Image (cartoon, rainbow, N blue to C red):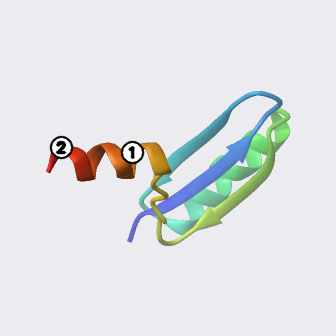
């Protein structure tokens, strides 16, 4: 099962995927060492829709 790694720096957010928990933990440690913060690993990705995208999709369909 893929694992997603979420991290932030001052102006950016990233999401990375790794196939194993061990690889995800290694990458999370690397990101922390590089100064990224709010680093977390999740087994499932939750997709969030913004209101603007939701409205555009309903008008297009």
Separation of marks 2 and 1 at Cα, in angstroms: 11 Å
**Sequence-earlier tag: 2 or 1:** 1
Residue pictured at 64% horizontal, 47% vertical: 27
Residue pictured at 52% horizontal, 58% vertical: 4
In the image: residue 59, left or right of residue 49:
left
Image side of residue 17 versus residue 28, left or right = left
Residue 54: % across, % down: 37, 52
Q: Is residue 34 above or below residue 41?
A: above
The image quarter in which residue 19 lies: bottom left
Q: Are marks 2 and 1 in contact (CB under 8 Å)?
A: no
Q: Residue at x 80, y 38 (%)?
A: 36
Q: Quadrant of the N terminus?
A: bottom left
| Residue assigned mark 2 | 60
Q: Toward which corner of the image does residue 53 lie, by quadrant? A: top left
- Residue projecting furthest to the top: 11
25 w.r.t. 34: above or below: below
Could you say whether the residue bearing mark 1 is in a helix, strand or loop?
helix
Which residue is tagged 1?
A: 53
In the rendered picture of this protein, how many numbered marks are placed on residues? Answer: 2
Mark in the foreground, 2 or 1: 2
Residue 44, given in percent of the width and then of the height, sits at 47, 71
Q: Which of 48/23 is in front? A: 48
Determine the residue located farthest toward the left in the rendered image: 61
Mark 2, residues whose alpha carbon is within 10 Å: few (<14), some, or many (≥20)?
A: few
Residue 31 in the image: state x and y as whole percent.
Answer: 73, 41
């Amino acid at each position: 099962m893929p694992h997603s790694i979420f991290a932030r720096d001052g102006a950016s957010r990233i999401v990375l995927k790794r196939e194993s928990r061990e690889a995800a933990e290694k990458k999370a440690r690397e990101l922390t060492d590089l100064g990224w913060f709010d680093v977390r690993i999740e087994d499932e990705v939750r997709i969030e829709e913004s209101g603007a995208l939701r409205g555009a999709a309903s008008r297009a369909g």
